Image (cartoon, helix red, strand yellow):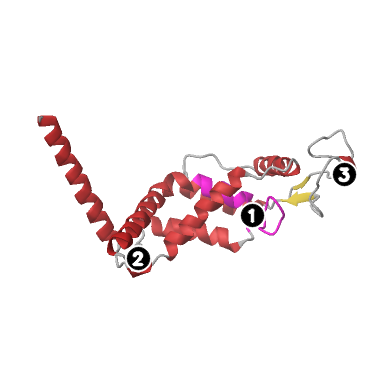
Amino acid sequence: MPVFNFDFNRSITRIDLPAERSGILIPNLTSLELHAAEMDRFNALVRRFAPERPPFTLDQIAGAARRVLRAAHQGEESAFIKVRMRRAGELRAAARDRQWERSPERVDDVRDLLDYLDAGVGLIPNHIPVIGLLDDAILVDVAMDRLRGELDDYADFCRYRIAEAASRGVAVEAVAVDRAQWFEERQREHRLEQQLRRVRATR
């Protein structure tokens, strides 16, 4: 298994300075072990979500980890990880929402992606400081081209449900609405919009 030494006896942010003068270091994180078997499993999911994308290499993952660590040493949070994990949270919310019937062609995709994220022991174990969620974030990023439409639909469904609750003067939880009703309402709005456009055009 490749072991990538981050050489924390020297500075990450300023390689010419000794560790005691280089700023904040990550305690006990001196190297990262990446296993070929986990890399193969990771790339199998990558191929599923993006068949045309070349597989990731161990060096690419290690390089990404170094960049995240350098940013952390400079006091910068990884926006890449933060945004992708927020998207993962949206996927979990959609998967748990009993009123949201997931698109049949996306059920297996969402389940397998969440299984990988929730296992916590993928290519980079989640317990590793700073970079533990990096592989999860990369996989979510790859999957977004396939799953973005589903998430956008769910976000619109949530807005519709909140609006319905407000119009009825009840709590959101009290609104009994499902995906089919939301879709029909959106189709009705679309037909009305088209009709209004035709009317405006005749004027």
Q: In x, y percent, where is residue 48?
A: 47, 49
In the image, residue 200 lies in the stretch drawn in magenta: no
Which of pointers 1 and 3 indicates the residue nearer the eye?
A: 3
The CA span between labels 2 and 1 is: 38 Å
Which of pointers 2 and 1 indicates the residue nearer the eye?
A: 2
Amino acid type of the residue tagged 3 in the rendering: Asn
Which of pointers 3 and 2 indicates the residue nearer the eye?
A: 2
Tell me, for residue 99, which label it has, or none. 2
Above or below — where is 93 with respect to 24?
A: below
Is residue 103 among what the camera can see? no
In the image, residue 136 lies in the stretch drawn in magenta: yes
Dot 2 crowding, Cα within 10 Å, few <14, some 14–19, many 20+: some
Dot 1 crowding, Cα within 10 Å, few <14, some 14–19, many 20+: few
> Residue at 9% of width from left, 30% of height from top?
202
Magenta stretch in the rendered image = 122-142
Dot 3 crowding, Cα within 10 Å, few <14, some 14–19, many 20+: some
Q: Quick one: 32 or 17, which is closer to the camera?
A: 17
Mark 3, residue position: 9
Query: N-terminal of the two: label 2 or label 1?
Result: 1
Task: Indicate left or right for 78 with 12 as reference.
Answer: left
Above or below — where is 16 with respect to 172?
A: above
Is residue 52 among what the camera can see? yes
Amino acid type of the residue tagged 1 in the rendering: Ala
Q: In x, y percent, where is residue 176?
A: 30, 68
Residue 94: which quarter of the image? bottom left
> Residue at 68% of width from left, 50% of height from top?
131
Task: Indicate left or right for 146 with 31 as reference.
Answer: left
The CA span between labels 1 and 3 is: 30 Å
Query: N-terminal of the two: label 1 or label 3?
Result: 3
The CA span between labels 3 and 2 is: 53 Å
Tell me, for residue 37, which label it has, or none. 1
